[in-house]
Amino acid sequence: MNKINLSLIATVVPLVIVAIGLVGWILTLRTDVTSAVVQINVLQEEIMAIRETLVSEHVLITNLEKSLAIASDQMKTIMGDHEYMGEMLRELGETQPPGERREYGGY
């Protein structure tokens, strides 16, 4: 009878040790998964903040491009007007006596 009990103990003890190790491994795995989920949530929040920043920067860049296009158009208009005025003053200067002639334009 002792042999049966001894063989039963020899069989059950390793199984209990393996079961305890398996429970410990499962608890560790659960902690790791929970930690990973928290890190993923934090990362998603950071990505959303970056996305919002990119959208606002895109709006600013678009507005800046529009402003630059308007300023460029206005500058072309002003330069065209100045060129026309320069031509008019040059023609006017050619009709003046030699001492009264001046150079205009050349911007």
Image (cartoon, helix red, strand yellow):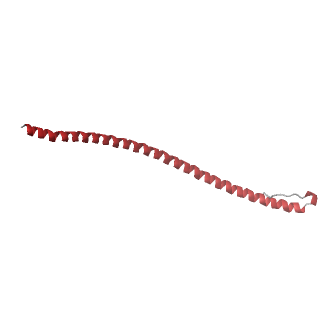
Q: Is residue 72 above or below residue 32?
A: below
Instruction: Tell me the residue at 85%/62% (across/down).
Output: 91
Instruction: Tell me the residue at 31%/40% (across/down).
Output: 28
Q: Quadrant of residue 74?
A: bottom right
Q: Residue furthest left?
A: 1
Instruction: Name the side, left or right, on which 27 lies relative to 55.
Output: left
Q: Is residue 20 above or below residue 76?
A: above
Q: Position of residue 102 (x, y in %)?
A: 87, 57
Instruction: Tell me the residue at 34%/42% (across/down).
Output: 32
Looking at the rendered image, the quarter that the N terminus falls into is top left
Instruction: Name the side, left or right, on which 93 lies relative to 77.
Output: right
Looking at the rendered image, the quarter that the C terminus falls into is bottom right
The residue lying toward the viewer, choosing from 28 and 40, is: 28
Instruction: Tell me the residue at 27%/39% (across/down).
Output: 24
The residue lying toward the viewer, choosing from 30 and 71, is: 30
Q: Residue furthest top?
A: 2
Q: Position of residue 3 (x, y in %)?
A: 8, 39
The residue lying toward the viewer, choosing from 7 and 106, is: 7
Instruction: Name the side, left or right, on which 56 lies relative to 13.
Output: right
Q: Position of residue 5 (x, y in %)?
A: 10, 38
Q: Quadrant of residue 34?
A: top left
Q: How many marks?
A: 0
